[in-house]
Image (tube, coloured by chain):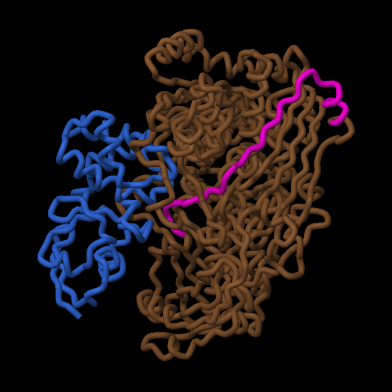
Amino acid sequence: MSSISIQVNGVSEARDVEPRVLLVHFLRDVLGLTGTHVGCDTSQCGACTVLLDGASVKSCSLFAVQADGRQVTTIEGLAKDGKLHPVQQAFWDQHGLQCGFCTPGMILSTCELLARNPKPNEAEIRAGLEGNICRCTGYNNIVKAVQQAATAR
Amino acid sequence: MTQPLFGQSIKRREDPRLITGKGNYVDDVRLPGTTHAAFVRSPHAHARIKSIDTAAAKKLKGVVAVYTGKDLIAGGMKPLPVGWLIPGMKIPVHNVLTVDRARYMGDAVAVVIAETPYIARDAAELVEVDYEPLPAVADGLKAVQSGAPAVHDEISDNVSFRWQLGDKAATDKAFAGAAKVVKQSFRNHRLIPNAIEPRAALASSNPGTGEVTLWLTTQNPHVHRLLMSAFVLGMPEHKLRVISPDVGGGFGSKIFVYPEECAVVWASRLLSRPVKWTADRRESFLTDAHGRDHYSDAEMALSADGRILGLRVKTNANMGAYLSLFAPAIPTYLYGTLLSGCYQMPAIHVDVTATLTNTTPVDAYRGAGRPEACYLVERMVDLAAGALGMDRLEIRRKNFIPKDKFPYQTPVAVMYDSGNYEGALDKALESFDYKAFRKEQEQARKQGRYLGVGFSTYVEACGLAPSQVAGALGAQAGLYESATVRVHPTGKVTVFTGSHSHGQGHETTFAQVAADELQLPMEDIEIVHGDTGQVPFGMGSYGSRSGPVGTAAIYMGAQKIKEKAKKIAAHLLEANEADVVYEGGKFAVKGSPGRFKTFGDVALMAYLAHNMPKNLEPGLEAISFFDPGNFVFPFGTHVCVVEVARDTGHVKLVRYLAVDDLGRVINPMIVDGMVHGGIVQGVSQALWEHAEYDEEGQLLTGSFMNYAMPRADDVPSLQVGRTETPSPVNPLGIKGAGETGTIASTAAVANAVMDALSPFGITHVDMPLTPGRIWEALRGK
């Protein structure tokens, strides 16, 4: 067991974990933050995307111990004071989700994309989200959602 | 919002929870004391199981139990059922855990139950299975050759059934009199559904009551409950409750009863502890029912002026190692019946051979039989145009079923409800200048750029289905849908629907329908689905049936509510029932609008029952079952423009335009979204996705690293539009919207690529149209 302490959505979480526990399982099974999803086992689908010190990472490809002493933002940490984050709002407004399973990862990837490039064109949006797979939307309205979020910021 | 809400793009009610991480998918459900299951799966496509040694696994700390197929059978577990029977069909035994032979890569041979998922996996690796590998066959055509290894000893020729439809003699006669016969062989390759949420099951038994609650990723909780309890587990149906909370996509793959959910229910009863299993993606690739996998030989008979006289099709449909639940219906009644397309074809004959192979079972995947039919017909029409030197739109217009001929009886059993095929094509051409494109194409060719346009003028059958017809064709189920409309004493309403939402947005669209019919604000209406403990027996969602069938049941339930409420209102108003009108949530006496009772007043009295009409029961609740009189038949025109790179064979999607006729549309925003997603799934079959097995039956494309899922940067923005021809089949005039995109688009893309390749004399390349395949076709040209 290793003792770790991670700031998750602004709250310090200190736990003893097996070194082999993946960050995504730490979030879901230890902290009960089930908004972060697991869609694959080869770090291709992006459903498990979270922000680690502001950068998007696939939480299935990190051990929890690697996040020791760092800050993690999950989908549960985006809305503030009951107000949706502009990216969340845009996904709702533009019907950027259907089954919702890829959505938390897609939203967090979008947050990072817009932090890097606040006014992306369509090609940049599509390239920026190529690490997140959506099976429902054909990406059409996800692109629109990112465009709205870019305008709102 | 002003009513009617029908037709308005109302934002989805389910989204606030899904965008904030508050969704509740099966793997998110937490129960104290939960154990975790991991399955031991065959790495071989075909092997004799000589022995299974579970001793080391059982010894590992944290392991609760290890079971093999023999344990399950000894414990009363029966084989998985087949839900659609074809005359003469041979049904191989499909045990939950296979006992003496593994028949596909991934076939489960043992299950480990442990305190954590990590320990369960560790222990699964400690189960020692002594396999004797056997010769395997993965390919449908090879499986029926003499000397092919038998997947099941009792079915030595690997043929589960042969099925034919249409008038063979009339078809032969049509060919005898044809001026031109066009022939083509097609490979409609295998696909893997890949809903992004992997399948999952969590069973919790209550030893005190004997009840089991199963949280399951299912598109049809009642179907699961019925089949699992009555056929597999041998437990009373009413002691099993199936809950499908949020479900992360289905596309068909979550319809079927799979081994894993049966095993976890069985184990949870034995252990008196909750047992959970969540597939990893590798298991999804190996065990979610696959889609398509046909070889077809098609021939079309034509007159000299381009009239279609007949169509003859022979298809080999690969069913995999076992017959999945609805597998027999897919290459038969959902395929052969669509071979007339949107054309007047006097004679059609189709002959299907369903083969067993050492591969993952194949069943319904978005479109299910209809994409295969549409691809074949639309490709053949293009090939016919080429052979006759006709324009591809001219041949279509010449053969379209005219709009005044509906309902239209095809020669392959189905009767199209309504349609206006020219109308959809005309509308598409308003946004796509065909003449200008041909000029641009010619100019581009001079510069060595190869543009192509493809059309798919499709029709499909959905809204499954008239129960009596389905029963006559072999379905072991009815295909109606149910709804309970429950009015509460305060006038708020809960609608319990037998339909199921796994991304379709029913909590929104169904509330729109109910709010309109009851003339209440949408906020007063809650939609509940996905729980056999709450909703009446229903058939769930697949085959684009929720709109045309599911909402009709709600519509009917609402009428019953209004009928009874009116009686109560008339009584309270001391008026004749015939003089009471319901408008804007108020029952008023005709001619004296001041004399009224609100819907809430009436609801309250229904439950107080202090002053009810004579002989009327208290309460205000109605249950309805809608059994459609026919399928519904959406149609439309899809147009795809591609550019093929001469040197690399790479296909670039330049433009995609769809005009669909889905009848009346409840929520245009949601329907557009479904169409977008459907199109990309069909495009992806044409260009990228391919489930590939090697000669030994090893799945070569078993992860997202080597199975090409479409990504955001693979596709352009899509342009979608609509015409509206209401369906006469249901009271709201709805045709289904969930599958049209997938059904139509594959052919549009393939036709576009072949158009681009036409200067090289290439008329056909089998899908997926990857750079390698196109480069190969272009080599030496």
User: The chain drawn brown is chain what?
Assistant: B
Question: Which color was chain A given?
Answer: blue
Up/down of B665 relative to B60, above or below: above
Q: Position of residue B409 (x, y in %)?
A: 79, 28
Question: Left or right: A51 with respect to B571?
Answer: left
Which quadrant is the N terminus of chain B positioned in? Answer: top left
**Is residue B753 left or right of A112 when viewed as pictured?**
right
Segment tinted magenta in the rendering = B172-198
Residue B564 in sight: no
Number of callouts: 0
Residue A64: % across, % down: 21, 68
Q: Is residue B419 above or below residue B290?
A: above
Residue B248 seen anywhere in this rendered image of the structure: yes
Residue placed at 66% from the left, 81% from the top?
Answer: B76
The reply to whether the magenta stretch includes residue B590 is no
- In this view, the residue in front, B197 or B303, is B303
The front one of B500 and A21 is A21
> Does B39 sit left or right of A12 as displayed?
right
| In the image, farthest residue toward the front | B780
Out of B88 and A90, give the one closest to the viewer. B88
Q: Is residue B492 above or below residue A69?
A: above
> Can residue B182 be found in the magenta stretch?
yes
Residue B575, x across and y down, in percent = 67, 34
Q: Is residue B229 above or below residue B763?
A: below
Image quadrant where residue B297 sits: top right
Which residue is painted at 59% across and 36% down in the image? B736
Q: Residue at x 51, y 40 (%)?
A: B768
Residue B269 percent coordinates (x, y): 55, 80
